[in-house]
Image: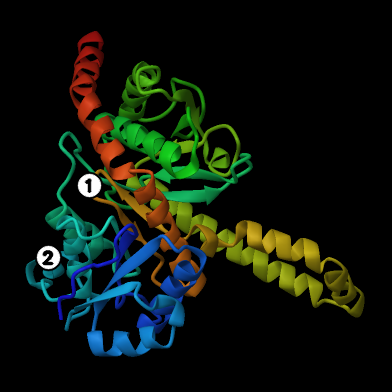
Amino acid sequence: MTDQPTQTGRIIISVDAMGGDSGPAVVVAGIAKSADKNPKIGFILHGQEQELRKLVAKRRVLDGRVVFRDCPDVVTMEDKPSQVVRSGKNTSMWSALEAVRAGEAHGAVSCGNTGALMAMSMLRLRKLPGVNRPAIAILWPSRNPHGFNVMLDVGADVRADAKDLLQYALMGASYARNGMALSRPRIGLLNVGTEEHKGRAELKEAHAMISDFADQANFEFVGFVEGSDIPGDKADVIVTDGFTGNVAIKTGEGTANLIGDLLREAFKYSPLSRLASILAITSLNRLKKRIDPRRVNGGVFLGLNGTVVKSHGGADATGVSAAVKLAFTLAESGFAEKLAARVASTAALAQDAAHSVSQSE
């Protein structure tokens, strides 16, 4: 069935209902949470229609808010991106991206295979003119007043030269403005030290290029930052290559899980510690909410002709709802159009900057 959206005035989010580890029931529960909180949102739901209709029928808040796209196939976590690109036209992931490409939806959300989603997004939505490598940006809990820092790239591409890092800085600044309402975000370039003489040649070149662009792109460049600054308050946007960024987020997730396990063990140690945990329950719940990864679930693919949010494969309903909220916020702000304009206006200038740096060496 190929229903057409009739949700006039709503921002439509295209959702791949089949890609997550927990199946479509969790995805439908997540979009129901979003619909309950936000009357301005509607959905195009992609997957096995008969199953999805039964799940949606149980959620009264979704009445009149969902359009279905029947897709017989599913992209699994084991599928290779190259294979999916060749033979994935009947999958829910492909269909979700097609809705954005056709202008039926303002953004797409998927819990599916990250590599396949990026490869398919590049194929169907294409890169913005002037973008060499798209990036995945995530929100990282931090000491900043707004609570989070933007970090990119965290895995779209393991490589990045100086011009790529400059583009990441420009895209990250635009994301921070539209996703976090920061009028003049602070950009930091991740390195092994803060001194300008440290790091690989491409980092030093990127440092000079980003510094040259700071004023005209309306951001503050704080220079090199270290790993300890990722959750800190020195910068709002942390720029790095995909290999380093992915290692960092996986390390952060593992450390957060370890701390949680150690706290639970500590409070079970004795009757007195169990009593202490009861007395501290309010503070512990506040801490849990503050660092809960579900609240910021969603990596945004930057540098494409459309907004795509990658939700964690194991996300629960709260996590799916958070990813949908992020896609909605970006769509409502006109982020995709603003980013395209920003990239287009700076592409030629970036080439000039790279040329002037190479000439001075």
Residue named by callout 2: 85
Q: Residue at x 39, y 71 (%)?
A: 313
Asked which secondary structure carries label 1, the reply is loop
Image-quadrant location for residue 299: bottom left
Q: Nearer the viewer, mark 2 or mark 1?
A: 1
Q: Quadrant of the C terminus?
A: top left
Position of 85 with respect to 138 (left or right) is: left
- Residue projecting furthest to the top: 360
Q: Split into 4 quadrants, where in the image is the N terminus? A: bottom left
Tell me if residue 160 can be seen.
Answer: no
Labels 2 and 1 touching (C-beta < 8 A): no
Q: For this view, does 49 lie left or right of residue 245?
A: left
User: Which of the pair 10/119 is nearer the observer?
Assistant: 10
User: Which callout, 2 or 1, points at the residue further toward the start of the chain?
Assistant: 2
- For the point 22% across and 42% down, the residue is 133
Can you give x and y, in whole percent of width and height, for residue 275 in the image?
Answer: 89, 75
Image-based side of 112 in relation to 187, left or right? left
Identify residue type, mark 2: Val
Q: Nearer the viewer, residue 123 or 71?
A: 71
In this picture, residue 16 sits left or right of residue 348: right
Q: Position of residue 115 (x, y in %)?
A: 25, 62
Residue placed furthest toward the left: 86
- The residue pinned by badge 1 equals 304
Q: Label 2, label 1: how many angstroms apart (C-alpha)? A: 17 Å
The foreground one among 158 and 137 is 137
